[in-house]
């Protein structure tokens, strides 16, 4: 069955064109995805950038940089001349950058600076940052400086050892002679008496009573001198 309303006398070319156009509704055309920077096919990103008036474009960028530039274009055009637009433009180069106005750091009036802990990977990135800032800022504001802060992290190990000892020295210190009285007296006395009677017929030895007394006395004197 023919899918057209051509008359029976239609030519073959007219019938072929009619059949081709009748299948256009079967062709998938993702219109919404084409206008979304994060979903648009990579080969169509330059056309989308042209449609959204992206001010800065470079074919040498990575795919992520191209998508981010397109994504920020609408916001930059709506907020040009404000600190928020400058901050958004700087975010395309640095992830941690901060735009500080002159009254934040005591600078000259109508001046501002960009502070970041990142680093430029090439001269091209630096020139791109300058162009983005000049395009996003207002005419009366002036870029005073781009401050790049470097942070160095280094591990430091601290160890403590405590040694404690006792040192005793006995040197040639003059000694003070000290005499301690010491008395130990001892004496000994022994008294013994005996009585003997001799008989002419026999010898008899008779021991009478004996009285014995014993005592001891001892005396000692010490003299000690200690010298070094």
Image (cartoon, helix red, strand yellow):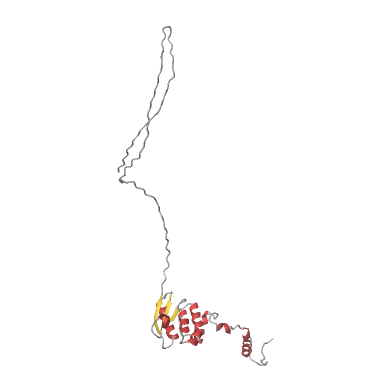
Pick out the residue farthest to the right.
1
- Whether residue 128 is visible to the viewer of this picture, yes or no, is no
Viewer-proximal residue among 7 and 32? 32
Viewer-proximal residue among 112 and 175? 175
Query: Residue at horizontal 52%, vertical 79%?
Result: 42
Quarter of the view holding residue 103: bottom left
Q: How many marks?
A: 0
Pick out the residue farthest to the top.
201
Q: Is residue 186 above or below residue 96?
A: above
Viewer-proximal residue among 179 and 225? 179
- Whether residue 43 is visible to the viewer of this picture, yes or no, is yes
* The C terminus - image quarter: top left
Viewer-proximal residue among 91 and 169? 169
Position of residue 168 measured from the top left corner of the image (x, y, whole percent): 36, 48
Q: Is residue 32 left or right of residue 90?
A: right
Position of residue 179 measured from the top left corner of the image (x, y, whole percent): 33, 40
Query: Residue at horizontal 48%, vertical 78%?
Result: 65
Q: Is residue 195 above or below residue 74?
A: above
Q: Is residue 174 above or below residue 199?
A: below
Position of residue 220 measured from the top left corner of the image (x, y, whole percent): 35, 34
Position of residue 226 measured from the top left corner of the image (x, y, whole percent): 31, 41
* The N terminus - image quarter: bottom right
Q: Is residue 100 left or right of residue 26?
A: left
């Amino acid at each position: 069955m023919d899918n057209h309303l051509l008359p029976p006398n239609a030519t073959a070319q007219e019938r072929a064109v009619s059949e081709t156009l009748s299948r256009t509704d079967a062709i998938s055309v993702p219109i919404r995805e084409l206008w979304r920077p994060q979903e648009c096919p990579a080969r169509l990103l330059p056309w989308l950038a042209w449609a959204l008036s992206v001010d800065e474009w470079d074919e040498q960028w990575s795919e992520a940089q191209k998508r981010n530039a397109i994504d920020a274009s609408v916001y930059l055009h709506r907020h040009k001349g404000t600190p928020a637009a400058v901050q958004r433009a700087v975010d395309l180069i640095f992830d941690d950058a901060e735009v500080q106005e002159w009254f934040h750091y005591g600078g000259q009036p109508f001046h501002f600076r960009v502070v970041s802990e990142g680093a430029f990977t090439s001269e091209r990135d630096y020139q791109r940052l300058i162009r983005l800032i000049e395009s996003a800022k207002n005419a009366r504001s002036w870029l005073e400086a781009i401050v790049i802060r470097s942070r160095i992290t280094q591990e430091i190990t601290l160890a403590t050892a405590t040694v404690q000892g006792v040192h005793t020295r006995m040197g040639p210190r003059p000694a003070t002679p000290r005499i301690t009285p010491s008395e130990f007296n001892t004496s000994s006395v022994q008294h013994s008496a005996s009585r003997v009677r001799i008989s002419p017929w026999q010898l008899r030895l008779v021991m009478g009573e004996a009285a014995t007394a014993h005592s001891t006395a001892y005396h000692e004197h010490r003299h000690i001198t200690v010298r070094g």
